[in-house]
Amino acid sequence: MKRWIPLAAGIWIGLGLVITALGQPDPEGLYELRKERYQPRLDERRAFVQPGELLHYMYETSVDLQLIDVRSERDFNLFHLLDSRRLNESELTGIARLEEKPQRLTILIGNGEAAAVRSWKQLTALKVPNVYVLEGGLNHWLDLFNEGRLSTPQPSSPNDPPQLDHLRHAFDQALGARHPDSRPPKTLLKQLSYEPRVQLKTKARKGGGCG
Amino acid sequence: MGPFDVMAWGSALGLGVYFLIGIAFGFILESAGFGDSRKLAGQFYAKDLSVVRVMFTAIITAMLLLFLASSVGLLDYSDIWVNHTYVFADVVGGLIMGVGFIIGGYCPGTSLCSAATLKLDGVFFVLGVFVGIFLFGESVDWIREAWFANAHGRLTLPELFGLPTGIVVLMAAALAFAFFLVMDALQRKFWPKHADTRPWFGKRAAGELQRESFPPSRPKRVSMS
Amino acid sequence: MTLSIQPESASVTQPPREAERTSRPATRPAPYWNQYAAGTALGVLLFLSFYVTGSGLGASGGLQRIVAWLTALVAQNHVNTTPYLAEIAASGKTPLNNWLVVEVAGVLVGGFLSGWLRGRVKVETFRGPRVSDRTRWALALLGGIIMGWGARFARGCTSGHALSGGAVLSAGAWAFMFAVFGGGYAMAYFVRRQWL
């Protein structure tokens, strides 16, 4: 048998086994590798969108808004924002895979921020553009909105500890999106002030290869 | 960590990198003899096996290097362009291209090498490609639905099979090896006088690695002994 | 001693097979590279391309831009009103100032360089022994048209889609690859006159 054949086959198989043993970095690992690039967005709060801004985008028809709820099914049934959909953290990679629409704005929604931030890290590491976290989560949202009106006094910023991630509010019935605060009326925008954080990246990712 | 935003280095330097890559690509293709349509078409008669050998060796080699680099954190796989999957367009387009390949004798990349070395059939092929691309632009509105059918985005084989990447890589390597052996055997069967390799195993395995089925032409005549 | 020469093509000067079998390098023509070695070289290049630029190799994308540019030269209005062409070459855009086109230019240069250094640059036509030059040219043109259309429909040609897409394990690319081989093998019998 020719000398180089077993050598080549050995190299191929050997490298293949090394690849299998080492495994590929998962999204958390990928995030860690590029941490310096992404962490500032979290630390400087640039990746967090305030409730007022989210309300604005709920009525902004020119932008394709995608609301992703990363909470448990039980919490989701109790209350969720209108047109939001629930995904497990493991299903997030499915989103990253599908056709990227540069004008699509993705907002991750949790009870607090912890779960949503974890999901944000995953999607950002997978290069999904325009992903933000709802600041304060639904706990803060429900502090702010009260039966389709603004609470008085208006809570300024979420003061929950960051690890708090269970639903602080109680519900008599599981209304889901039928709850009036699932999409507060547009008129409230005039009374709300917020710091706009969303910067839509419109440039589609470089389409490589032969095209 | 790769990959890099090459164009951010400046458009001259960035484009220069792509130019160099293209030169290397064309150089290797022509060196392997892919400027010769008889070799390329010969694949489909098991007469000449250079396409199968070069292509699959290249794919596996690149694959091994890519995923090794990704495993050790040298390369960010999510930043790599992975062709999106449109099942209908991929399968039907592939069949059409297979037909075009055997009729025309080239594929767009190799036809460029052929035309660059002044082969007339290569030149005609390139002109045909221009026409074909133009016709596609005119017809795309009618077939738009088919063109976007069965979209699965950036779907990779490990995701599809639910297997670890390394296992899929090993499967691909095994497939390539099997393909080499089978094609070699077919070539020896159908073109015994023409076969350019000896068997890999067994007594007759010794000897010269490879003879050329379609030797390149030279201006000088070679004297017969 | 009889020489078993198979007349491959009337238009190609062929050294006798005997000279090859006795492996006297001085009388052999510059051979093509060993195929597995060439494949390995190509694979390394493909990896480097991905590593540095994030994209693989490709040809039909650049050719598409050239087509759009040429069309814009003669019919700019048509280009502006056809979305497929407009996104590349609408008024004010520079379709040629793009890495795909530059890479295609590189392929031409590289192919020429390789051929020139080995004495393979020569005006000739590759074909099987049973067809004429003209027939071959017509079929090359027809094949090119089919390939050009198919390459855009499949969103890539064998270099970009099969080779590059295959290396990164794109599911669609592998399906494409099998389909190309399938289509070629299926059609091979019907065009055997051209090659054999």
Image (cartoon, coloured by chain):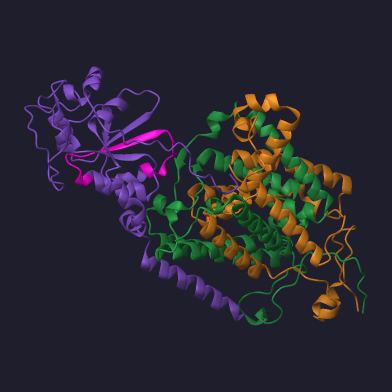
Chain colours: A purple, B green, C orange
Could you say which is closer to the camera, residue A208 or residue B158?
Answer: A208
Residue A106 covered by magenta stretch? yes
Measured as percent of width and height from the top left, residue B69 is found at 45, 65
Looking at the image, residue A91 sits to the left or right of residue C97; the answer is left
Measured as percent of width and height from the top left, residue B133 is found at 68, 37
Specify the farthest residue to the top: A187
Looking at the image, residue C160 sits to the left or right of residue A161; the answer is right
Counting the numbered discs, the total is: 0
Q: Is residue B221 visible?
A: yes
Q: Is residue C60 visible?
A: no
Measured as percent of width and height from the top left, residue B101 is found at 70, 48
* Highlighted magenta segment, given as a residue range: A95-115
Residue appearing at x 87%, y 62% in the figure: C7
Image quarter of the N terminus of chain A: bottom right
Q: Is residue A116 above or below residue C8?
A: above
The quadrant holding residue C1 is bottom right
Image quarter of the C terminus of chain A: top right
Residue appearing at x 62%, y 51% in the figure: C58
Q: Is residue A139 above or below residue A36?
A: above
Q: Is residue A39 above or below residue C15?
A: above
Residue B143 covered by magenta stretch? no
The quadrant holding residue A33 is bottom left
Measured as percent of width and height from the top left, residue B157 is found at 45, 53
Could you say which is closer to the camera, residue B55 or residue A116?
Answer: A116
Residue appearing at x 30%, y 42% in the figure: A47
Looking at the image, residue B39 sits to the left or right of residue C61; the answer is right
Could you say which is closer to the camera, residue B177 or residue A25?
Answer: A25
Could you say which is closer to the camera, residue A161 or residue A167?
Answer: A161
